[in-house]
Image: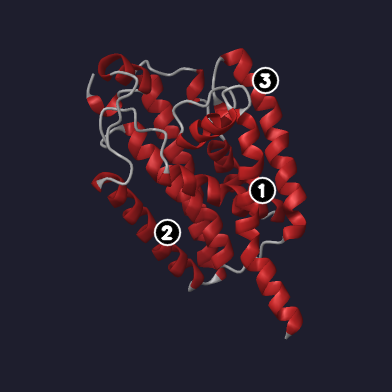
């Protein structure tokens, strides 16, 4: 099989479980980050300067790219006989693809809030600390898919904010309800399918959850998500809270 199509399982068998196709913040990783940043900033500037009709077309286009990106991975794994339950689109970022789709169709504030508060920091962390490096090289379906879909997932809510959407701390309970409400069934699904969606079943292979494990132990690493989520929400809403305070003083 050509290296381009090889899954994690085949790579582990051929190269060993500790193999990584490129180092964090090496040349390849920095180039991927730079290209992603340029794409996001350029698209956001285009969106901000566009008419309402063009903005809707851009959102539809980004949504279509997200769905095609997700479908490409699923089809690639299925057609090469490598698909397993772990490729179901049930990680938080994968689920946010469908939140983007629902928002494009219905234009709901709770979707926009969830995408701003959870999707941006989650997808950014994934790009900064990728957990998909155990494939043969950067030129593989899994790596290209993982980089592109996370860049698109940062872009979509950035477009919403660039278009005038103002996040509100008052909607944080809705965000938390979505997060924990989706994590609970995912936790039990992981037990039955032996999967690791939301990284709730196994801390290994992800630098963030591995850090939680180092601090809290393998048994309690899940508790690390609580302060991490609180910190992410604090940072995401701090600029808006500061702006509101400034306006009240004016």
Of residues 131 and 116, the one nearer the viewer is 131
Q: In the image as oriented, which residue stretches furthest toward the left?
A: 2
| Quarter residue 135 falls in | top left
Residue under pointer 2: 40
Mark-to-mark CA distance, 2 and 3: 35 Å
**Is 140 above or below relative to 175?**
above
- Horizontal side, residue 140 vs residue 154: left or right: left
**Is 106 above or below relative to 69?**
below
The x, y position of residue 160, in whole percent, is 58, 61
Residue under pointer 3: 188
Q: Which type of secondary structure does the marked residue at label 3 adopt?
A: helix
Query: How many residues crowd around disc 3 within 10 Å: few (fewer than 14), some, or many (20 or more)?
Result: some
Mark-to-mark CA distance, 2 and 1: 26 Å
Marks 2, 3: nearer the viewer: 3
The x, y position of residue 250, in whole percent, is 72, 86
Residue under pointer 1: 230
Q: Say which label, 2 or 3, has the lower sequence index.
A: 2
Picture residue at 65% right of the left edge, 60% below the top: 237
Q: Say which label, 3 or 1, has the lower sequence index.
A: 3
Query: How many residues crowd around disc 1 within 10 Å: few (fewer than 14), some, or many (20 or more)?
Result: few
Of residues 47 and 238, the one nearer the viewer is 238
């Amino acid at each position: 099989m050509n290296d381009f199509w090889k899954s994690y399982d085949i790579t582990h068998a051929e190269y060993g479980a500790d193999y990584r196709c490129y180092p964090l913040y090496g040349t390849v990783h920095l180039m991927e980050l730079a290209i992603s940043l340029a794409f996001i900033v350029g698209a956001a500037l285009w969106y901000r300067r566009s008419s309402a009709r063009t903005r809707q077309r851009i959102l539809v286009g980004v949504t279509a790219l997200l769905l095609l990106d997700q479908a490409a991975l699923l089809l690639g794994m299925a057609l090469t006989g490598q698909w397993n339950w772990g490729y179901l689109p049930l990680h938080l970022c994968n689920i946010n693809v469908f939140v983007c789709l629902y928002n494009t169709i219905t234009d709901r504030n709770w979707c926009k809030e969830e995408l701003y508060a959870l999707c941006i920091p989650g997808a950014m962390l994934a790009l900064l600390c990728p957990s998909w490096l155990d494939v043969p090289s950067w030129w593989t379906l899994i790596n290209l898919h993982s980089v592109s879909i996370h860049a698109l997932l940062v872009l979509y809510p950035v477009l919403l904010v660039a278009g005038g959407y103002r996040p509100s701390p008052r909607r944080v309970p809705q965000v938390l309800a979505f997060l924990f409400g989706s994590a609970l069934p995912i936790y039990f699904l992981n037990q039955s399918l032996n999967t690791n969606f939301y990284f709730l079943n196994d801390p290994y292979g992800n630098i963030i959850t591995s850090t939680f494990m180092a601090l809290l132990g393998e048994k309690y690493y899940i508790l690390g998500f609580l302060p991490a989520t609180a910190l992410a929400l604090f940072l995401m809403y701090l600029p808006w809270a500061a702006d509101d305070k400034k306006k009240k003083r004016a």
